[in-house]
Amino acid sequence: MKPVDHVDPSKLTIGNDPLPAHRARANKYADLMAKLKPGQCIKCAPNHVGQVSNALRKHIIEKELPCQVRSTKNYGDGMARVWLLANARKLKAA
């Protein structure tokens, strides 16, 4: 486990730098998630499964999808999987 790297407030400074014209996207996974259909999965490195799962949960909430997330850190090939699965109860109610 990595030690926690705490911020030392005495080393912080205040500046008047302008905001850059190009900023990182709010959700770097948005394009990938938009293509994902219920029943499909995202294949990723085992150490990334938590980040990808959380991004997919956020996508489900933002898009109000009747879905759920399931994941495994080892699918048997040394890679992880994160599935987007249809939530049967919500689909029947809709």
Image: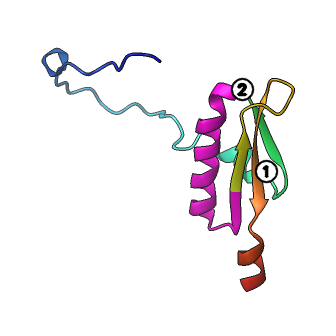
The disc labelled 1 sits on which kind of residue? Answer: Lys
Tell me the quadrant of the picture where the C terminus can be found.
bottom right
Stretch in magenta: 46-68
Give SS at disc 1: helix
Q: Is residue 66 magenta?
A: yes
Rendered location of residue 56, percent (x, y): 64, 49
Q: Is residue 60 magenta?
A: yes
Q: Main secondary structure of the magenta part?
A: helix
Residue wearing tag 2: 45
Task: Give the number of callouts.
Answer: 2
- Disc 2 secondary structure class: loop
The vertical placement of 68 against 70, above or below, is below
Image quadrant of residue 71?
A: top right
Closer to the camera in the image, 61 or 69: 69
**Kind of residue at disc 2:** Ala
Residue 5 visible in the snapshot? yes
Residue 53's tag is none
Q: Residue at x 20, y 18 (%)?
A: 8
